[in-house]
Amino acid sequence: DIVMTQTPLSSPVTLGQSASISCRSSQSLVHSDGNTYLSWLQQRPGQPPRLLIYKISNRFSGVPDRFSGSGAGTDFTLKISRVEAEDVGVYYCMQTTQFPLTFGGGTRVEIK
Amino acid sequence: QEQLVESGGGVVQPGRSLTLSCGASGFTFRSYGMHWIRQAPGKGLEWVATIWFDGSKKYYADSVKGRFIVSRDNPENTLYLQMSSLRVEDTAVYYCARLVGPAGGEVTDPWGPGIPVTVSS
């Protein structure tokens, strides 16, 4: 199974500043079709998860451009620029390259 | 509007069975694979099962293999999760989600609001 490791566990951030979350996979997420199926999800308190980023760096419909994804192979990063109050929640990376699908443990973003 | 809504959750004793449903609307259900994903209280997300658009392929997490069965009724736009021999550790909020694309999905969206299942004596 592919293990997804997220850091940090918690990220206190000042409004208007940036936050960065790292996700590392135990093996390459490059699929046989050449694509890398790494997604980022946001879960606000009391809400279901919501897709933010797919295939490393593609913003999903309706996602503000403050959210950006980058990386390759086994190392990936989600960056939140100009953090707003509505960004508070837990962020998960998820790999869908191979079964079993696996998630990172989550990073809690909170306002200082 | 593309929407998923889970139902059928509740409190059940260990060793008993329960079937969850996920109703789809606003999109062509029969064209998409579907996931079940769960979240234990205060914990992270755990993938449970996936079924191909036509039901031809099914995948399960080791933690539920042999106890849970995923199925679908395309004419009724409904996804199911039959859970048997339930354990305390199956207690979680269960989400259904649509997968778009190859492998386990390029895009996982939308998600349902989730339905709680509590396994307790």
Image (tube, coloured by chain):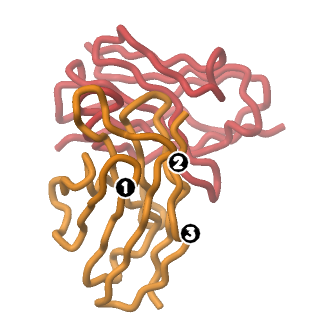
Q: Which residue is mark 2?
A: B45
- The chain assigned the colour red in the figure is B
Report the chain shown in orange. Answer: A
Residue drawn where x is 35% and y is 63% of the image = A77
Mark 1 in CB contact with mark 3 (< 8 angstroms) = no
Assess whether mark 1 and mark 2 are in contact (beta carbons under 8 angstroms): yes
**Subunit of label 2:** B
Q: Amino acid at mark 1?
A: Leu
Q: Is residue A47 above or below residue B3?
A: below
Quick one: label 1, few (<14), some, or many (20+) residues within 10 Å? many
Secondary structure of the residue carrying numbered label 2 = strand
Alpha carbons under labels 1 and 3: distance apart: 15 Å
Q: Secondary structure at mark 3?
A: loop
Where is residue B80? Give x, y as percent.
45, 22
Q: Amino acid at mark 3?
A: Leu
Q: Amino acid at mark 2?
A: Leu
Q: Which mark is residue A41?
A: 1
Residue A90, x across and y down, in percent: 47, 65
Distance (Cα) linking label 3 and label 2: 15 Å
- The quarter of the displayed image where residue B26 is located: top left
In the displayed structure image, the side of residue A59 where residue A49 appears, left or right: right
Q: Secondary structure at mark 1?
A: strand
Taking B47 as reference, is B42 left or right? right
Which of the 4 image quarters holds residue B22?
top left
Q: Residue furthest right?
A: B121
**Residue B102's mark?**
none
Do circles 1 and 3 both sit on a common chain? Answer: yes
In this figure, which residue is indicated by the disc labeled 3? Answer: A9
Q: Residues within 10 Å of mark 2 (few under 14, many from 20)?
A: many
